Amino acid sequence: MNSADSGLIYLIESSRNTDKETDLVAQRLQSITLSGYFELDFHSYGSKFTNTGIYEAIKKCNLFQLQRCIEYGENVHLIDEEFGTSYVMLVVSFAEQHTESKYLPMLHELAMASCDVNSLDMAGNSALSECIKKNLEDMMVSLLQLGAEGSKHMVKLIDRHSGPFYMQTKRWYEKHTPSLRQAIVNEDIRAIKRLLSHWCRVNIKHNGVSLHEEAVKLYGRQHIICDLLESHYHTMELIHSALAGNKKRVLDFKTNYRCDYNWLNRGYQKNVLKPLEPRSIYDAVKSLGHTHLLDVVPQPSISPSASDRTSENEGVTSRLCVIS
């Protein structure tokens, strides 16, 4: 083959490669949804973010596969290099209103594995903001329970995107804000008690500092805020392990720690027009379809009375949970 032929073949192959790249770009653009968020099948591009069992588990909505991947040490902190997407955000991107309950436990599982629920993608979106845009109310509540930070921007998104569900979405949002961290910084003990009664997780970190460490630094170890955080620590871990459907972790807390199985979610309502209906861990697990946990999560030894329906655990402290 002479040099002229070689040059011609090179030009043809280069043209083909350019066409392939153009096609890939076109495919990516087509994958942008009307909501402004993306639901890409990244597998075509072979990134580190997508070539993992965690990505496959989320894509297939396979909770048990996700739990195995995390247990075997897959990196839950990977971020997509092009879009800045975390696995928490990926769960939200795949979820729709009719599949929300199936994806919701994955948020708890990833958060329990120390995934950052407040991470932002390249466009400045968070998992919380995308839940609001997609009217995924239950996921919004879960993210707030797991430490997602509210803001005036989130309230504006609720105003803009909630439509006929505005009143309900805003009510759920207000029940779980400010965040537990913000309440601690503001020394708002009433808000802290309310958030704990709504199952807001204690074991979260902000800039690498745990809520308990931050409270000790601000107020000293003997302050009532530190006492509240310590006394609810293990019960909240048990609750979110149960919501994640993680039987191994639930059994670990049941065996090795003293947790309050009677700690109800005092803020639960079927909808905003219904009265408060305090919910047990057992009932929450059952509603999520975690039938494999029904034999290990005890039913509460007390039943909510009529008077309980108007209270929100104000002033109540679970003394069974102590950080060891």
Image: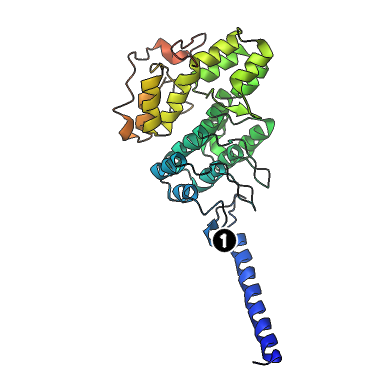
> Residue visible at 52% across and 34% down?
111
In the displayed structure image, the side of residue 2 where residue 46 appears, left or right: left
Q: Residues within 10 Å of mark 1 (few under 14, many from 20)?
A: few
User: Residue 24 appears at what percent x and percent y?
Assistant: 60, 66
Task: Write down the quadrant of residue 105 in the picture.
Answer: top left
Q: Is residue 178 visible?
A: no
The residue to which callout 1 is attached is: 45
User: Residue 121 appears at what percent x and percent y?
Assistant: 65, 45
Image: 21 above or below 231:
below
Check the image and name the residue furthest to the bottom. Answer: 2
Q: Check disc 1 and report its element: helix, strand or loop.
A: helix
User: Residue 154 appears at what percent x and percent y?
Assistant: 64, 34
User: Residue 87 appears at what percent x and percent y?
Assistant: 54, 44
Q: Is residue 238 visible?
A: yes
> Residue visible at 63% across and 16% down?
215
- Residue closer to the observer: 98 or 285: 285
- Residue closer to the observer: 48 or 189: 48
> Residue visible at 55% across and 10% down?
227
**Tag 1: amino acid:** Tyr
